[in-house]
Image (cartoon, helix red, strand yellow):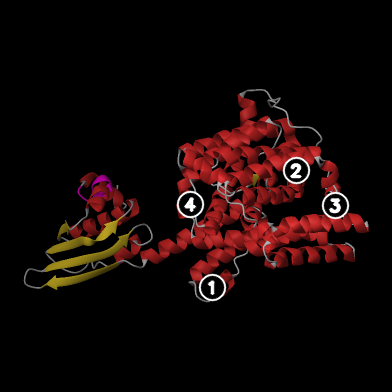
Amino acid sequence: MLEHIKRDWLSNIRGDVLAGIVVALALIPEAIAFSIIAGVDPKVGLYASFCIAVVIAFVGGRPGMISAATGAMALLMVTLVKEHGLEYLLAATLLTGILQIAAGFLRLGELMRFVSRSVVTGFVNALAILIFMAQLPELTNVTWHVYAMTTAGLMIIYLFPYLPVIGKAIPSPLVCIVTLTIVSVIMGLDIRTVSDMGKLPDTLPIFLWPDVPLNFETLAIIFPYSAGLAVVGLLESMMTATIVDDLTDTTSDRNKECKGQGIANIGAGLFGGMAGCAMIGQSIINVKSGGRGRLSTFVAGAFLLVMVVFLDEWLRLIPMAALVAVMIMVSIGTFSWTSITDLKKHPLSSNIVMITTVVVVVMTHNLAIGVFIGVLLATLFFANKIGRFMVVKSNFDEDQRIRTYEVKGQVFFASAEQFIDYFDFKEVVSTVIIDLTHAHFWDITSVSSLDKVVIKFRREGATVNIIGMNEATETVVDKFGVHNDPNEVDKLLGGH
């Protein structure tokens, strides 16, 4: 226990604290913007970001990952807030947390094993594009000062690390924000600042219970939204965990992360915040700035609250150009540039999955839909590919008039029809031997195809022997096969 505390909290104190401060600064405009998207007061997003980040630091399964209010979640709240108000949103946030905790106990985090690398790459590239597109309003119809400040910010971010000693000691995004704020104040530039994003809260969050009736009608209203929020939140969190795992060469406990996200959302709902989840952009800022442990996540949440409540006068002065520069850095760092050159090396099916995921996410601004379609395509391509790896060879013993069919490969729903086509039912033979030593039958469809083969041969007067079934195949055939059941034979072949 003590060893875990030292590793997750105390092994990288300076790096985690500095990275947490950078992330806290980047969270402010995001949280305000997402609150506006959801149709609620900016303090709802800011309180949510504080609560979720602080709680997840203790109960999450992925050290160094940042969770807070997010745009993907905010989009799902719009209709609920518009039709029923904030109190129902808070209730939906509590139910979201309960569903996510249940998902953790059901070990649904393991489902990430079914998300292919092509889908993850498409997800990452789409998110990078969305992050960049989100900055365009701050770069449209503005004075040249904004472009100059943004360019200067990017130069600081990318060139500062090359300075000896100090370049590695202080995160360059933090230097960018501080420097551009000082320049903006001294020169009195007329450009947008954080204060233009919305009113910042001036009090600490307080514990409150949603003012909604506790009955079935309320549950019927909030459950569809909570279910959607739970799925999108866990999906984005699991994808983020995968990416941070790759960046840090470490592993995470996905089921624990599911429970942690649920606990954090319950905490947010009880303190007037909306539901949130892991954030890829801020998590990458954290890692790139040197954050590795739970301390960085805790500092991000705690410092966010301190800034918006106690240092708001200073915070309002930060030019949006500085934060835009940081987010553009995140966008560039998030995009998988090697995926462009890999298009020539990777199979066409993988490229289609990756590009489709990108296009759907960017067009719908919904990460869940894009990932779902990507996984569906990857599954179809995989099933088609594996289905073609099944062959049936045969040899004939003329003296005894015995035809032996040797099946090799995987027989399942995608290859079942092809399996039947390999057999010649019009050939006059006395005995048919179907050798399954090198085959594996996976599902009901494959067993049904075996039934059809056996029954058709028997109707032609041949004796059929099935040999070589492995234990798994024998189990599924014994359970679902009907070729030895006279009552089921006619049903299978369409008779009555």
Is 432 or 106 nearer to us in this picture?
A: 106
Q: Which residue is mark 2?
A: 35
Looking at marks 1 and 3 on the same chain, the residue that comes earlier in the sequence is marked by 3
Kindly state the secondary structure of the residue where label 4 is placed.
Answer: loop
Q: Are marks 4 and 3 in contact (CB under 8 Å)?
A: no
State the CA–CA distance, disc 4 to disc 1. 25 Å
Looking at marks 4 and 3 on the same chain, the residue that comes earlier in the sequence is marked by 3
State the CA–CA distance, disc 3 to disc 2. 17 Å
Kind of residue sitting beneath label 4: Thr
* Position in image of residue 137 (x %, y %): 81, 58
Query: Is 409 on the left or on the right of 359, as rendered?
Result: left
Q: Which residue is mark 4?
A: 251
Please say whether residue 83 is one of the residues in the magenta stretch: no
Q: How many marks?
A: 4
Kind of residue sitting beneath label 3: Thr
Q: Residues within 10 Å of mark 2 (few under 14, many from 20)?
A: many
Which residue is painted at 25% across and 49% down in the image? 481
Kind of residue sitting beneath label 1: Asp
Looking at marks 4 and 1 on the same chain, the residue that comes earlier in the sequence is marked by 4
Q: Residue furthest left?
A: 399
Kindly state the secondary structure of the residue where label 3 is placed.
Answer: loop
State the CA–CA distance, disc 4 to disc 3. 39 Å
Q: Residue furthest bottom?
A: 344
Q: Are marks 3 and 2 in contact (CB under 8 Å)?
A: no
Looking at marks 1 and 2 on the same chain, the residue that comes earlier in the sequence is marked by 2
Which residue is painted at 88% across and 62% down in the image? 142
Kindly state the secondary structure of the residue where label 2 is placed.
Answer: helix
| Residue 193: mark in rendering | 3
Which region is colored magenta?
Answer: 477-484
